[in-house]
Image (spheres, rainbow, N blue to C red):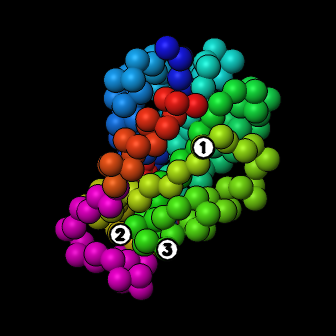
Amino acid sequence: MARILLAYSTVDGHTRKICDRLSQCLETDGHAVTLASLSDMPLPDPESFDKVVIGASIRYGKHRQELYDFIRINQRSLDDRPSAFFSVNVVARKPGKSSPDTNPYMRGFSRKTTWRPTLLAVFAGKIDYQQYSFLDRQVIRLIMWLTHGPTNPHDCVEFTDWASVDAFGHRISRL
Ligand SMILES: Cc1cc2nc3c(=O)[nH]c(=O)nc-3n(C[C@H](O)[C@H](O)[C@H](O)COP(=O)(O)O)c2cc1C
């Protein structure tokens, strides 16, 4: 049994939902999981865990600064143990942009940090227009229109491939 930290950076909660699903997989495989938001204090200490998994969503082209702050403060601990990182964004709904090698935000992540997680994954996120402010809704609708996605302001579409999330969970178990 391994002690596994699942830390997440989310705005609307979808990355947390993916972490909940990963947590179920890892607990089924017999591990002890701790979930922690990178927005909450005190932040978890990776030294207390055998493996560390971090997930973060994209907003307006970027992962939030709290992700990079956590990595910078804890990089030695992260480098010392098996680790995984996943990014959540809607560009990943496109088949040619859904892998760590082809997703532009994962490439940006690798340029921005020297942490090299043992495992990487990219998951397509969710669009829920009614949850957004008026301005965010209009901007996302425009982006969706340009990229042939859903534009109805009442739409709530989850693009996440949950079988891929489960497969990633079992890969983390085997790290
Ligand atoms: C205001 C806003 C900006 C977004 N910007 C991007 C973006 O630049 N690229 C992208 O692929 N997805 C973008 N998304 C989609 C989010 O990454 C997606 O909704 C994800 O599921 C959010 O995860 P979270 O709920 O954990 O924050 C954006 C979503 C919102 C609401």
Q: Distance between the residues labelled 3 and 2?
A: 25 Å
Residues rendered magenta in the picture: 141-160
Q: Which of marks 3 and 2 is in front?
A: 3
Q: Residue at x 80, y 29 (%)?
A: 76
Local crowd size for mark 1, using a 10 Å CA cut-off: few (<14), some (14–19), many (≥20): some
Residue 137 got which mark? 2
Camera sees residue 73: no
Residue 150: say if magenta. yes
Residue that badge 3 annotates: 96
Residue 119 got which mark? 1
Q: What residue type is labelled 3?
A: Gly
Report which quarter residue 52 is drawn in.
top right
Q: Which quadrant would the C terminus be assigned to in this image?
A: top right
Q: Which of marks 2 and 1 is in front?
A: 1
Camera sees residue 117: yes
**Disc on the earlier residue, 3 or 2:** 3
Q: Does the residue labelled 2 lie within 8 Å of ligand 1?
A: no
Q: Residue at x 32, y 49 (%)?
A: 162
Q: Does the residue labelled 3 lie within 8 Å of ligand 1?
A: no
